[in-house]
Image (tube, rainbow, N blue to C red):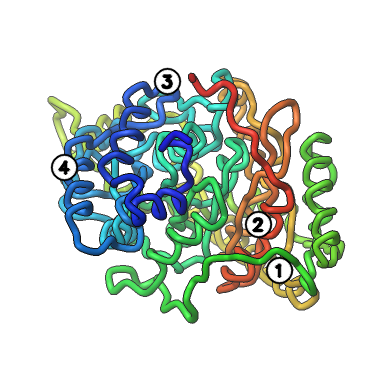
C-alpha cells in the first residue's frame, strides 16, 4: 500500500512501529501537492513541514499524532504563512499568531503542509467563489467539490493528506465531505476555539475535521476540543472524546427527518440514503419518522442571520490595518469604497449588502430580529425530536456534485445546496457526514446529528454505519 493510501490512524501506527517515518510520510504527501491538478492548495510550506517532521522523528517518544501531515483551510491563521480566506483583500497577508485549534494539533504532533483553497470568506457552496480559481472535484474534474471548505475536502479525497481542517457555518464541512466521498464533522458550537478563524458569521462558525474514516475524525477532535481563554464562546468539554469502536446500534433510535427526505432531494440521493438507513435496523437500531416543522424556514433564517453577522465582521477590512489597499485615493470614504470594491468578490459584496440592509434602522426587527425568533423555534423542534430519538438523519446534500459553472449565475440555486445542513447549524448541534453510496457514479453523503455534547454517541453510530456500509470507492477522475 502506498503511503498516501494510509488512513491517518494507519499512518500513526506505521510511524510508531518504525515501518516508516514522519519525514517519509510528509515527503510522499508533498509530492502529491506538487502536481495539484485540483487546485486544492493556495500555499504549501514544504521547508517548514519537513523541518517539523525531522523534529518529531528525533523525539524519543512520538506525540499522539506522530508527525502525520495535515492541510488547513485558508480561513485559519498560521503564523508567517500566507492566509487569505480566499480573497484578494487579504492577498499577501501573513498572520503574527496561529489559531488555537491549529496550535493544539501541532502540539499533538500533526505536521501542517499547507493552506487550502476556499470560497471567499467561506461564502459559497461550491468553492467557485475563491479569488484564486475554483477547486475541482477528484471524482470528476468538471464538477465542484462543494464549499466553502472545498480545498480541504479535495485534499483528503485526492490523497494529498490523510486529513484536514475546515470550517462550517451553514454546512461548509459536511456538504463538501458528501460531494467528495469522505467524512466531515461539525462539532457542537463552542467545542473548538474559533480564535484565529477569520470570522464569517460568529454565532454559526465552527471548526471541524475532514478525514477518510470516522475514527480519524475522532482523533483530530480529541486534540482540539476544550476551553480557550482567547475565545469566550469556547466550552469546557464534559467528557473525553473516545475513539469509536461500536459494531452494533442496539437500542439506538434514529429519527429520519421527513422534511429532508422528500421534495427537493434527488431520487438517487434519497435512494442511497434509504439503503444506508436500512442498515440501522439490521444493526439493532430503530428508525423513527420525525418532523421538524420549522426546518422549511431554515434557509431564509440563515440568509438573514449569516449576512447580518458577516456585514459586521467584514467591516474590519478597510485597507488601513492590513491587506489590500487602494492607491491614490483622495479621501477616507473613497479609500474605503475602492479598497473594498477591488478586494471583495461578487458573492461577498452581495452578502454584505443583504446583511447591512437587514440590520438597518427600521428593518432590524422585521428581518434580523424575526430571523432570530425563528431560529429559536428551530432549536425547540430539535429539542422535541431528541426527547423521542437519540440521533436524527437526513441526506447531507440534496444532490451529488454539480457541474462547474452550473449555479454561479443563480444564487438561490446555490444556496439550496445547504438546505439539509443549515437547520442543524442554526441549532448549534454536532453533525457528521459519512459516504453512503453512489448516485450517477458520484458519492452521496448521509448526515447524522445529535444533541449538544453527544459527539461520542454520534461518532459511535457513524462508525458502526460506516463499517456496515463499507464504502470503498475512490475517485476515478483524480488526476492519477
Q: Quadrant of residue 226?
A: bottom left
Horizontal side, residue 239 vs residue 333: left or right: right
Nearest the camera: 195 or 296?
195
Q: Examine the image and state in which quarter residue 23 appears.
A: top left
Per the image, label 3 sits on a secondary structure element best described as loop
Q: CA distance from mark 1 to mark 2?
A: 9 Å
Residue nearer the viewer, 408 or 475? 475
Given this view, does label 3 or label 4 mark the residue nearer the observer? Answer: 3
Circle 2 Cα neighbour tier, 10 Å, few/some/many (<14 / 14–19 / ≥20): many
Residue 429 placement (x, y as % from top left): 59, 65
Q: Are marks 1 and 2 in contact (CB under 8 Å)?
A: yes
- x 34%, y 41%: residue: 74
Contact between labelled residues 1 and 3, with CB atoms less than 8 Å apart: no
**Which of the pair 19/106 is nearer the observer?**
19
Look at mark 3 in the image and give the residue it sits on. Answer: 37
Asked if labels 2 and 4 touch by Cβ distance under 8 angstroms, the answer is no
The residue tagged 4 is 320
User: Mark 4 or 1 closer to N-term?
Assistant: 4
Q: Earlier in the sequence, mark 1 or mark 2?
A: 1
- Distance between the Cα atoms at labels 3 and 1? 42 Å
The residue to which callout 1 is attached is 382
Q: How far is disc 4 from disc 1 in space, using C-alphas?
A: 44 Å
Give the mark, 3 or 4, whose residue is nearer the N terminus: 3
Amino acid at each position: 500500500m502506498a503511503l498516501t493510501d494510509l488512513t491517518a490512524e494507519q499512518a500513526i501506527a506505521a510511524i510508531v512501529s518504525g515501518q516508516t517515518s514522519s519525514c517519509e510520510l510528509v515527503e510522499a504527501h508533498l509530492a502529491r501537492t506538487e502536481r495539484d491538478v485540483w487546485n486544492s492548495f493556495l500555499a504549501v510550506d514544504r521547508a517548514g513541514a519537513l523541518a517539523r517532521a525531522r523534529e518529531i522523528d528525533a523525539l524519543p517518544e512520538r506525540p499522539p499524532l506522530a508527525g502525520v501531515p495535515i492541510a488547513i483551510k485558508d480561513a485559519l491563521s498560521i503564523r508567517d504563512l500566507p492566509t487569505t480566506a480566499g480573497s484578494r483583500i487579504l492577498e499577501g497577508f501573513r498572520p503574527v499568531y496561529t489559531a488555537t485549534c491549529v496550535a493544539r494539533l501541532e502540539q499533538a504532533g500533526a505536521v501542517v503542509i499547507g493552506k487550502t483553497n476556499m470560497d471567499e470568506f467561506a461564502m459559497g457552496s461550491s468553492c467557485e467563489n475563491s479569488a484564486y480559481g475554483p477547486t475541482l472535484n477528484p471524482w470528476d474534474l468538471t464538477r465542484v467539490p462543494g464549499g466553502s471548505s472545498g480545498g480541504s475536502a479535495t485534499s483528503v479525497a485526492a490523497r494529498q493528506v490523510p486529513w484536514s481542517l475546515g470550517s462550517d457555518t451553514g454546512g461548509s464541512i459536511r456538504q463538501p465531505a458528501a460531494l467528495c466521498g469522505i467524512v466531515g464533522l461539525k462539532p457542537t458550537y463552542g467545542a473548538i476555539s474559533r480564535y484565529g478563524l477569520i470570522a464569517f458569521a460568529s454565532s454559526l462558525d465552527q471548526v471541524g475535521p475532514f478525514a477518510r474514516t470516522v475514527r480519524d475524525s475522532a482523533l483530530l477532535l480529541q486534540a482540539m476540543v476544550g476551553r480557550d481563554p482567547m475565545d469566550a464562546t469556547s466550552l469546557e468539554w464534559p467528557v473525553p472524546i473516545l475513539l469509536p469502536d461500536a459494531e452494533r446500534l442496539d437500542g439506538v433510535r434514529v429519527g429520519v427527518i421527513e422534511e429532508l427526505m422528500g421534495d427537493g432531494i434527488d431520487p438517487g440521493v434519497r435512494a442511497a440514503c434509504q439503503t444506508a438507513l436500512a442498515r440501522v435496523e439490521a444493526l439493532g437500531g430503530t428508525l423513527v419518522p420525525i418532523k421538524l416543522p420549522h426546518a422549511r424556514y431554515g434557509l431564509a433564517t440563515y440568509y438573514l442571520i449569516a449576512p447580518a453577522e458577516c456585514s459586521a465582521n467584514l467591516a474590519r477590512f478597510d485597507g488601513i490595518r492590513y491587506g489590500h489597499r487602494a492607491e491614490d485615493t483622495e479621501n477616507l470614504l473613497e479609500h474605503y469604497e475602492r479598497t473594498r470594491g477591488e478586494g471583495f468578490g461578487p458573492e461577498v459584496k452581495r452578502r454584505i449588502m443583504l446583511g447591512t440592509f437587514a440590520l438597518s434602522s427600521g428593518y432590524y426587527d422585521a428581518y434580523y430580529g424575526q430571523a432570530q425568533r425563528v431560529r429559536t423555534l428551530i432549536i425547540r423542534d430539535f429539542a422535541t425530536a431528541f426527547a423521542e430519538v437519540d440521533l436524527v438523519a437526513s441526506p447531507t446534500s440534496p444532490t451529488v456534485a454539480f457541474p462547474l459553472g452550473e449555479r454561479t449565475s443563480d444564487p438561490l440555486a446555490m444556496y439550496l445546496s445547504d438546505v439539509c445542513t443549515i437547520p442543524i447549524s442554526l441549532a448549534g448541534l454536532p453533525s457528521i457526514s459519512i459516504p453512503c453510496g453512489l448516485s450517477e457514479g458520484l458519492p452521496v453523503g448521509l448526515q447524522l446529528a445529535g444533541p449538544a455534547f453527544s459527539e461520542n454517541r454520534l461518532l459511535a453510530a457513524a462508525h458502526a454505519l460506516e463499517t456496515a456500509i463499507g464504502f470503498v470507492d475512490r475517485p476515478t477522475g483524480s488526476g492519477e
